[in-house]
Image: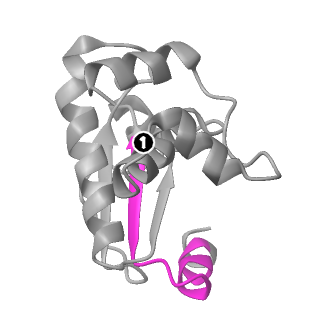
Amino acid sequence: MGAQNDELLRQFGIQVVISILTRRQAALRQLVDWHPGASSVESHMVFDLHDNANPAQINGWENCLDAITETVRTGRRTLVHCTQGVSRSGIAAVLVYARLHDLKPDEAIARINGKYRVVGGWNPKLFSFLCEELSL
């Protein structure tokens, strides 16, 4: 499976992978090294973040969003993923897009979605919590 994933990352030109997982989820995927090297990507960062509104995780979210913003600003093609659906990764993508384009999160959602729904379906409590705590 790893070789197949590496080939897909190469095919799509992915340079950075950012995984938003809990420590338990990372361990189940054998991502025990929090910044593992992979032959097909420049770097792989794993952030231990949960899919709930937890004030203790604000610094982790800030670090994650900063990392995504930095990789995008430097032109590195970045894949952001979580485990089930789009909850954490979708929220992160919207918040970074809002930052990069100086938009409110709802404006970012509207612009990303355009005519077709692309993002959504995430934990609305987490999304609202992060928007409020991060002053977005």
Which residue is at 36% across, 50% downward? Answer: 102
Q: Is residue 11 magenta?
A: yes
Image coordinates for residue 96, horizontal then vertical, percent: 39, 49
Q: Is residue 107 above or below residue 50?
A: below
Colouring of the image: one colour
Q: How many numbered circles are shown?
A: 1
Q: Residue furthest right?
A: 116
Q: Quadrant of residue 107?
A: top right
Q: Which residues are magenta?
A: 5-20
User: Of the residues shown, which amino acid type is indicated by label 1?
Assistant: Leu
Report the residue marked by disc 1.
95
Q: Quadrant of the C terminus?
A: top left
Q: Is residue 12 above or below residue 86?
A: below
Q: Nearer the viewer, residue 105 or 37?
A: 105
Q: Is residue 82 visible in the rendered structure shown here?
A: no
Which residue is at 65% across, 43% downward? Answer: 110
In the picture provided, is 48 more to the left or to the right than 13? Answer: left
Q: Is residue 1 visible in the rendered structure shown here?
A: yes
In the picture provided, is 111 more to the left or to the right than 117? Answer: left
Which residue is at 44% across, 76% downward? Answer: 77
Image coordinates for residue 34, horizontal then vertical, percent: 24, 51
Q: Secondary structure at mark 1?
A: helix
Q: Quadrant of residue 41?
A: bottom left
Q: Is residue 94 magenta?
A: no
Image coordinates for residue 112, horizontal then vertical, percent: 63, 52
